[in-house]
């Protein structure tokens, strides 16, 4: 799949549910209305959809959400998709999780051929963790990370940089040192204006340029050329030997190397996280068991993948640039 700007699409991020057992303040409102179950693709349909993309050249598949591990019977989908790893059609099957269910599922994930996962963790302060996630408990996530590592999974931590006393700005360096002391990497993310959360994002938004400058007062950050086709720029920390990725949608444009598309749990294909254009894949998926209509719909959509996003965060602007929540498109 090649888009109009010559970018080859090899990475699919598939949201398997819009539901979650947390309500992170920057991601969701507290009283979220979730999709009626009938609108959500069945596990079988998710499998057909993912397999159609794999047949078209997707080499990396990430399951996300909402919280992917709260979807009922998600392990059966993962087991089924792992056939593409066995056949060599897929290089990597992975997921992004809040870690709450990892203790139960880590062994199974490893057995299914998952090698690496991303776990989101913004703070190691138990009170702050519960305040930020509204419903989460830190110990559950830490136990989950431990279980994943013991199962042999390589864990990367994702942390959203958040300003102010309610945020994590005063502990980012500690978080990095802790992550690196366990041999894990960490990616820092700027908040993106996605979906109504009931708060003013300008209050949370902490540019990573500032975070980086502060880190450099105590740590030596060496740029490394590692590129994953994604938005992250990586550095190695001389003092710890670990890596930090910086995802800076707000301060940098990373779109020229974009290799990915996203599909929601209702089968809507978003060619860009930061744009509203989408293509419905559920109707062609359901209308035609042969997959021909689905294949044509994917081709048509890739042909209009936009050049880039246009996020803006302005003080006092509560309405998001993109109305859907991150939990809908999948982070
Ligand atoms: N529930 C899983 C988790 O939290 O890892 C997977 C889905 S979550 C939407 C994926 C990632 O998006 C998480 O790392 C989360 O911190 C991040 N995220 C959510 N809302 C965001 C926002 N508005 N701006 C930037 N990152 C966001
Ligand atoms: Fe749930 Fe992940 Fe969104 Fe937090 S960031 S509310 S864990 S989907």
Image (cartoon, rainbow, N blue to C red):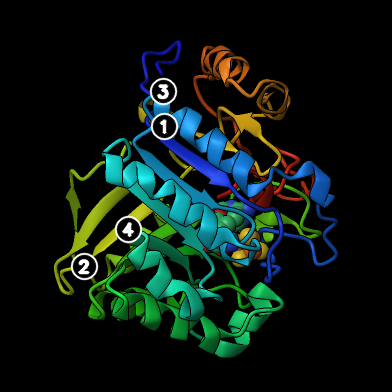
Mark 2, residue position: 242
Q: Measure how far apart labels 4 and 2 are at the Cα level.
A: 25 Å
Q: Earlier in the sequence, mark 1 or mark 2?
A: 1
**Secondary element type, mark 2:** loop
Dividing the image into four equal quarters, which quarter contains ligand 1? Answer: bottom right
Residue 110 x, y percent position in the rendering: 34, 66
Q: Nearer the viewer, mark 1 or mark 2?
A: 1
Do the numbered discs 3 and 1 sit on residues whose CB atoms are within 8 Å? yes
Q: Is residue 82 left or right of residue 78?
A: left
Q: Nearer the viewer, mark 4 or mark 2?
A: 4
The residue sitting at 39% across, 31% down in the picture is: 58
**Secondary element type, mark 4:** loop
Q: Measure how far apart labels 1 and 4 are at the Cα level.
A: 16 Å
Q: Measure how far apart labels 2 and 3 are at the Cα level.
A: 35 Å
Residue 145 x, y percent position in the rendering: 41, 78
Q: Measure how far apart labels 1 and 2 are at the Cα level.
A: 32 Å
Q: Is residue 252 left or right of residue 204?
A: left
Q: Earlier in the sequence, mark 4 or mark 2?
A: 4
**Secondary element type, mark 1:** helix
- Other residues around mark 3 within 10 Å, as few (<14) / some (14–19) / many (≥20): some
The residue sitting at 42% across, 73% down in the picture is: 106
Mark 4, residue position: 113
Mark 3, residue position: 56
Q: Nearer the viewer, mark 2 or mark 3?
A: 3
Q: Earlier in the sequence, mark 2 or mark 3?
A: 3
Res. 191 visible in picture: no
């Amino acid at each position: 799949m090649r888009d109009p700007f010559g970018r080859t699409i090899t990475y699919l991020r598939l949201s398997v549910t819009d539901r979650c057992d947390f309500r992170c303040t920057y991601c969701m409102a507290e009283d979220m209305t979730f999709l009626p179950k009938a609108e959500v693709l069945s596990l079988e349909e998710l499998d057909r959809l993912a397999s159609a993309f794999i047949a078209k050249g997707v080499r990396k598949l990430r399951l996300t959400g909402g919280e992917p591990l709260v979807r009922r019977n998600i392990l059966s989908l993962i087991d089924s998709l792992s056939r593409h790893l066995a056949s060599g059609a897929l290089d990597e099957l992975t997921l992004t999780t809040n870690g709450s269910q990892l203790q139960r599922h880590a062994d199974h994930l490893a057995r299914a051929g998952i090698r690496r996962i991303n776990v989101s963790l913004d703070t190691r302060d138990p009170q702050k963790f519960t305040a930020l996630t509204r419903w989460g408990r830190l110990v559950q996530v830490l136990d989950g990370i431990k279980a994943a590592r013991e199962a042999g999974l390589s864990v990367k931590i994702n942390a959203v940089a958040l300003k102010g006393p309610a945020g994590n700005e005063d502990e980012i360096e500690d978080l990095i040192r802790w992550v690196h002391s366990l041999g894990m990497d960490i990616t820092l993310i700027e908040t993106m204006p996605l979906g109504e959360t009931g708060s003013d994002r300008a209050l949370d938004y902490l540019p990573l340029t500032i975070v980086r400058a502060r880190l450099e007062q105590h740590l030596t950050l060496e740029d490394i050329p590692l590129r994953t086709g994604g938005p992250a720029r990586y550095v190695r920390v001389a003092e710890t030997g670990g890596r930090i990725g910086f995802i800076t949608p707000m301060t940098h444009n990373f779109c020229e190397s974009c290799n990915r598309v996203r599909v929601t749990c209702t089968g809507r294909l978003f060619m860009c996280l930061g744009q509203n254009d989408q293509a419905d894949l559920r109707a062609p998926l359901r209308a035609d068991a042969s997959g021909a209509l689905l294949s044509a719909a994917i081709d048509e959509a890739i042909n209009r993948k936009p050049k880039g996003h246009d996020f803006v965060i302005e003080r006092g602007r509560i309405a998001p640039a993109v109305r859907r929540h991150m939990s809908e498109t999948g982070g």
